[in-house]
Image (spheres, rainbow, N blue to C red):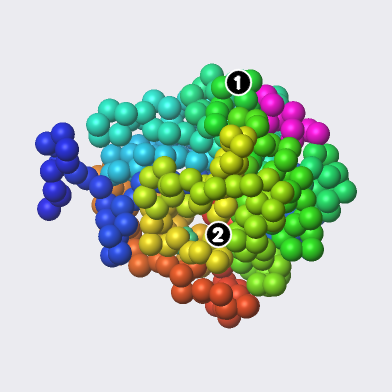
């Protein structure tokens, strides 16, 4: 039985076995990317002969919007479009327009966001904003071309990503967040330079611990720079103080500059697992539902969609999967130095949606 919500209407939120509600949906709109970040799609594995999903296997915009509508009826408030590189999906603004028509049971629009490498953002920011996109997160791992190019592995220049960030700000896609994945020995020497660059700007810079996602990036614990070290290095030059979380279970731990120069965040996926507050589900490019970033299998929603399932059928499947959810991979992995043996079967982040 559903409990009554604040408005007296039945509360149709889905709650898993650990008391976590389904609130966020990440949707991978393409498994392709124009970068080959060494920590995500290493060239040795994602080379020229890599087979990506054929178009017919991708969820259509109509199918994505339908799943999002069912999810919104059951508590999802935020949708993040990701990939792969989501801006490679043709006419993405048309999907954004469809999603921006959706409402929660209380009639509120959904919070629609996008994570992008920024390569195509300058050209697309205004049309995405006009279609209803609210916020954008841009990934940028260094301000130094040599370091950035070594990480993106396609010789992509920093300046173009910075232009994308500028266009996003000018289009009103704020607050713009910038994600920097920190990999020891690769870009950790740029932590303070990145902090200095975005200090005093409207951009919120977030440092992400390098994670053992997927099965191909050769992750090792000694390549992870703990968030505590990131904060200490910045604090030594640009004094910081903690900021209370904006809401319980916020994944990014916030800090602000003591001189009023704005704030930064750290996402401690390895040293400070936040599974206890994880309210996210993911839909892969071909329509499988995953309840954890580190999952090995997902449930095929596309087959249901393409075989005439009703919204009620889809809702029942969502509910069954979420209510049975037990995931807490990062808590269990803890600080073991190697990825577990079963990691070989894990799906890649570009497919499941980062
Ligand atoms: N292509 C887009 C981008 O790079 O922003 C969206 C997809 S990407 C998989 C989403 C986010 O995951 C990016 O911020 C990326 O830096 C992050 N990411 C990818 N691999 C990671 C890893 N091994 N550890 C931590 N973050 C990772
Ligand atoms: Fe592409 Fe994003 Fe993965 Fe880099 S992190 S390879 S940009 S999907
Ligand atoms: Fe959520 Fe899985 Fe990450 Fe834990 S490991 S925070 S359950 S996605």
Disc 1 marks which residue?
A: 171
Residue farthest to the bottom, as pictured: 341
| Vertical arrangement, residue 13 with respect to residue 210, above or below | above
Magenta stretch secondary structure, dominant = helix
Disc 2 marks which residue?
A: 268
- Name the foreground residue: 259 vs 133: 259
Tell me the distance, in whole angstroms, between the alpha carbons under discs 1 and 2: 30 Å
Q: Residue at x 63, y 78 (%)?
A: 338
Q: Is residue 160 magenta?
A: yes
Image location (x, y in percent) of residue 351: 58, 54
| Vertical arrangement, residue 226 with respect to residue 110, above or below | below
Observer able to see residue 202: yes
| Vertical arrangement, residue 292 with respect to residue 52, above or below | below
Q: Is residue 84 magenta?
A: no
Q: Quadrant of residue 213?
A: bottom right
Q: Residue at x 76, y 45 (%)?
A: 193
- Name the foreground residue: 167 vs 238: 238
| 129 displayed left or right of 15 | right
The local crowd at label 2, few if under 14, some if 14 to 19, many if 20 or more residues have their Cα within 10 Å, is many
Label 2: which secondary element: loop
Image location (x, y in percent) of residue 41: 71, 57
Q: How many marks?
A: 2
The local crowd at label 1, few if under 14, some if 14 to 19, many if 20 or more residues have their Cα within 10 Å, is some
| 99 displayed left or right of 188 | left
Q: Residue at x 28, y 28 (%)?
A: 107
| 118 displayed left or right of 319 | right
Q: Quadrant of residue 277?
A: bottom left
Provide the residue span drawn in magenta: 159-167
Q: Is mark 2 within 8 Å of ligand 3?
A: no
């Amino acid at each position: 039985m559903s409990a009554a919500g604040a408005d007296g209407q039945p509360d149709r939120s889905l709650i898993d076995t650990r008391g976590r509600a389904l609130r966020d949906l990440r949707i991978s709109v393409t498994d392709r990317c124009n970068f080959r970040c060494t920590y995500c799609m290493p060239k040795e594995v994602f080379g020229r002969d890599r087979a990506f999903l054929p178009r017919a296997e991708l969820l259509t915009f109509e199918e994505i919007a339908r799943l999002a509508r069912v999810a919104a009826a059951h508590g999802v408030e935020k949708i993040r479009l990701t990939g792969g590189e989501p801006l490679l999906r043709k006419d993405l603004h048309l999907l954004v327009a469809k999603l921006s028509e959706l409402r929660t049971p209380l009639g509120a629009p959904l919070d629609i966001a996008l994570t992008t490498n920024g390569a195509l953002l300058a050209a697309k920011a205004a049309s995405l904003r006009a279609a209803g996109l609210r916020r954008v997160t841009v990934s940028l791992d260094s301000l130094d071309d040599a370091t950035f190019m070594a990480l993106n592995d396609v010789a992509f220049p920093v300046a173009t990503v910075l232009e994308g960030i500028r266009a996003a700000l000018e289009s009103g896609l704020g607050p713009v967040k910038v994600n920097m994945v920190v990999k020891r020995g690769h870009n950790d020497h740029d932590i303070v330079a990145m902090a200095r660059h975005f200090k005093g700007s409207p951009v919120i810079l977030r440092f992400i611990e390098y994670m053992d996602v997927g099965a191909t990036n050769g992750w090792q614990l000694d390549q992870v720079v703990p968030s505590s070290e990131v904060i200490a290095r910045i604090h030594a030059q640009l004094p910081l103080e903690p900021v209370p979380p904006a809401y319980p279970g916020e994944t990014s731990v916030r800090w602000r500059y003591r001189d009023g120069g704005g704030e930064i965040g750290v996402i401690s996926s390895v040293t400070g697992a936040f599974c206890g507050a994880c309210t996210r589900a993911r839909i892969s490019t071909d329509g499988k539902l995953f309840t954890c970033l580190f999952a090995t299998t997902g449930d095929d929603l596309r087959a249901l969609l393409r075989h005439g399932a009703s919204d009620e059928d889809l809702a029942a499947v969502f509910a069954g999967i979420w209510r049975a959810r037990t995931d807490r991979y990062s808590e269990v992995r803890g600080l073991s130095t190697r990825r577990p043996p079963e990691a070989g079967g894990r799906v890649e982040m570009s497919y499941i949606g980062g």
